[in-house]
Amino acid sequence: QAKQHVRIVEVGPRDGLQNEKQSIPVETKIELIRRLATTGLQTIEAGSFVSPKWVPQMANSSHILKHILEDPPSSTEPITYQWLLPNVKGLDKFLSVHGTNNDTAAASSYPTPPPSPTTDTDNGPALNTSSSDANAMPSSTSGTNSTNAPHEISIFLAATESFSQRNTNCSIAESLDRFRPLMAKARDNNHPVRAYISVALGCPYEGPDVSPNRVAELAAELLEMGADEVSVSDTTGMGTAPRTRELLKTLKAAGIINEDIALHFHDTYGQALVNTLVGLEHGITTFDSAVGGLGGCPYSPGATGNVATEDLVHCLHSLGLDTGVDMQRVSEIGEWISEELGRGNESRAGKATMAR
Ligand code: HMG
Ligand code: MG
């Protein structure tokens, strides 16, 4: 009998790096994405098009997108790249690099790069990082797949007004108003849209008791607006097993099907895998994580990284589930990127795998 598949959305290059204080060379970011593409991961959130005044670390995302389009990382499976953005301005920046895509079918791939943009200022020349890096991993041995799925747009709003103001300088209602034209434009250009609901299990400003009904209402509204998936996010890691269970029950009671939900756990209180188990028992099959446990939201003080991809993969494999991800390879990447950033590797399973 085939093992049940669980989809992992690797958010390390975006959520994992956005909060790092030191500036990270764009070559390192691209190399991280290239390496991740060789692990069997099929979805990678690669950057964000947000205000560079708010999140300076992501300012070179245009450059990264351009690079991926011109020289797609080799991978055994097609990769879906996701790009986080908060408004139409961000989408326009994305489209100015990606090229508009109105005439192509949704399922088309991009065998030839789109025309180079002329309007953007921060996308420099194409880089070729992997070939010049002595430490680079060998390219994927089994095939070099360069035709990828359509790039996806990720949008985000909050389940509390305080977090909404801090993270996006607007109310929740204003976020929804921004999304209507954004979503229409993304869909006109054949880009699927995922929507995050932040602070779904606890808010740094309002505490742990975020209303599950409010989260369900927002999820329903985002799906009705056209989102393909809602990533229910525990930004602060305050989520516990009982409250995760209650939230999932509330979503179900509101008519939201499991296939439309992903879970995004930060591991601040060490509860991410416990909450993952609750999600699995409930029937959720998509989980977000970051290699090396990188990450944190700049507007959530004290919040640490996402659950480490290595920890998630180890846990899912131990349950007899299939992720398609090579544990050894992803552990090597966790070690490598932690060292590049001069920080400790936050993945227990990754460290243990490397110590074997
Ligand atoms: P604002 O200051 O209210 O916006 O920020 P504005 O429209 O007045 O624009 C201010 C300046 O930003 C202007 O530039 C705009 O052009 C520019 P100026 O004229 O002053 O030179 N601007 C932009 N530049 C580039 N790209 C854009 C863009 N939009 C405006 N898209 C805004 C409002 C939403 C833009 C701002 O608050 C922002 O960028 N916030 C993003 C914060 C962020 O990225 N947070 C982290 C990601 S969310 C997260 O991590 C949670 C998640 O992981 C799930 C979870 O764990 O909860 C997804
Ligand atoms: Mg996050």
Image (cartoon, grey):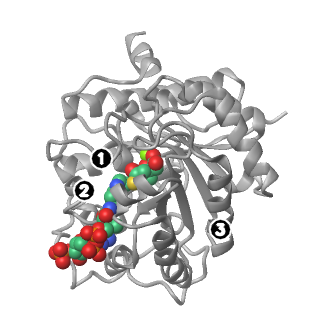
- Going from N to C along the chain, the mark reached first, 2 or 3, is 2
| Foreground pick, 161 / 62 | 161
The picture quadrant where one finds residue 354 is: top left
Q: Is residue 258 left or right of residue 211?
A: right
Q: Is residue 30 above or below residue 177?
A: above
Q: Secondary structure at mark 2?
A: loop
The picture quadrant where one finds residue 48 is: bottom left
Q: Is mark 1 within 8 Å of ligand 1?
A: yes
- Tell me the kind of residue under disc 3: Glu
Q: For the residues labelled 2 and 1, say whether their Cβ atoms are less than 8 Å apart.
A: yes
How far across and down, in percent of the image, does residue 182 sit?
48, 78
Quadrant of the image for the N terminus? top right
User: Which residue corresponds to mark 3?
Assistant: 221
Q: For the residues labelled 2 and 3, say whether their Cβ atoms are less than 8 Å apart.
A: no
Does residue 8 show up?
Answer: yes
- Tell me the kind of residue under disc 1: Pro
> Residue 55 got which mark?
2
Q: Residue furthest top?
A: 356
Q: Secondary structure at mark 1?
A: loop
User: Which residue corresponds to mark 1?
Assistant: 298
- Going from N to C along the chain, the mark reached first, 2 or 1, is 2
Q: Is mark 2 within 8 Å of ligand 1?
A: yes
- C-alpha separation, residue under disc 3 versus residue under disc 1: 26 Å
Quadrant of the image for the C terminus? top left
Q: Secondary structure at mark 3?
A: helix
Bin the neighbour count of mark 1 within 10 Å (Cα to Cα): few under 14, some 14-19, many 20 and up. some
